[in-house]
Image (cartoon, grey):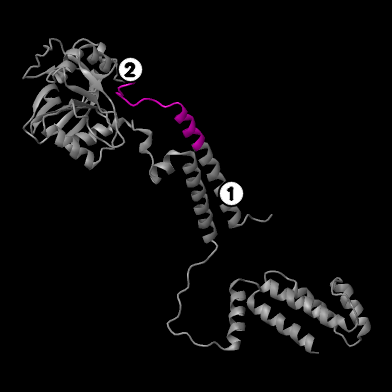
Amino acid sequence: MKRPSRETWWGIGIGVALVLLTIAAGIQSARAQQPSAPTLAADSSQPDGARALWLWLQALGYTTSSETLSVFALPEQASVVLMLEPYPTITTEEWERLDAWIDDGGTLVLAGDQWGSVLASRHFEFHIAYLLTAVPTLTVQSPLWLSPPVTVPVSANTRAYLETKRSDYVSHLAVGNQPVVVSFTQGQGRVILSAAPFPFTNAGLKVAGNPEFVLNVVAPVLRDGLVWFNEWHHGQRPAADAIGPGEWLRGTPTGHALLYVVGVLYLALIARGQLFGRPVPLPNHVSRRAPLEHITAIANLRRQAGHRTAELRYYYDNLKRQLGRRYHLSPDLPDNAYVEQLAAYDPNLDAQALLNLLSELRRPGVSESDMVRLANEASKWLKE
């Protein structure tokens, strides 16, 4: 049974890869048709959403907004920015705008314990560390928050705390001696970091003690100020924003198809490139080659490739063709019948020697020395 060639295996591999890519694209498309809201999204009514916080602040008289523009910008009337579990996509330019806004007197509330919050906390030289088990309640530390008074433990279900080398912060809630909620001043503004996002969620606001905690975070804002939910870093962007070539390739079906075709062509080129051997460096001095060198090179290549059986087959066919041409004998006859008819025409023929030679020429697995000997014997028969 003939073994599959390398090209066949590459074809099978590319076919399997295409099938897997098609399945993955189908799964991704199905997920895209059923999108899930980000954690602590302002329009999410899921237990981990922040819709209840939005409606509750509006009921208390605060002005809330989540409007975003085609580029990242903070509303002019914003007094508090709620950055709840942001995505890890905050650029340096966006941080510069946030820092300038804080320095001018704004209050930034950063709450979360996921990867985006970890990166955002590092901007303020704080690191989020994780507990072995979640802690249901937090210890209230001084100075106490009194607007309104927090009279019961805050049910945070926290699994993380904050670490820092800074000393200019105030710890408000902690797990033992490890701070979980801290605040510090920056310019004329204020930054509040919370490694416990649960009190801000729809489910968390239903637990006693959490509403008072959240109001202490927002209380410094005047009722005519604006509480801005930063949905920009939850991926909420105007449709006109995705107009660049990169966004077009990643965000449109046509772009996906183009990337798919380019990937297939790239795999095909790799597969075709495997047919070539290692590059042979050019000699330093190129000289004209002798005519016999080409013949010698071909012979050496055939010797390295182990074509001894094929060479002897050539001598076998040529010997029967040349010896039988004079008497119009078919070279396709079996050796015994061929030699018998040839001996009938030529009484001086050494039939047994010729029959032995033909048998030797058809023997597989001969050595190189035997090949040379048999080729010489066949040449002698042709000369006679």
In the picture, measured across the screen, residue 330 lies left or right of residue 98, that is right
Residue 210 in the image: x percent, y percent?
20, 14
Query: Mark 2 sits on what residue?
Result: 47
| Mark 2 neighbour class, 10 Å CA radius: few under 14, some 14 to 19, many 20 or more | some
Q: Is residue 97 magenta?
A: no
Name the one closer to the observer, 180 or 319.
Answer: 180
State the image coordinates of residue 75 (x, y, percent, origin top left).
22, 29
Segment tinted magenta in the rendering: 25-44
Residues at marks 2 and 1 touching, judged by CB atoms closer than 8 Å? no
Quarter placement of the C terminus: bottom right
Q: Is residue 175 visible?
A: no
Q: Is residue 384 left or right of residue 364?
A: right
Q: Residues within 10 Å of mark 1 (few under 14, many from 20)?
A: few
Q: Secondary structure at mark 1?
A: helix
Query: Which amino acid is tagged 1?
Result: Ile
Residue 271 lies, with reference to residue 79, above or below; the image says below
Residue at which label 1 appears = 12
Instruction: Determine the CA span between mark 2 and mark 1.
Output: 47 Å
The amino acid sitting under disc 2 is Pro
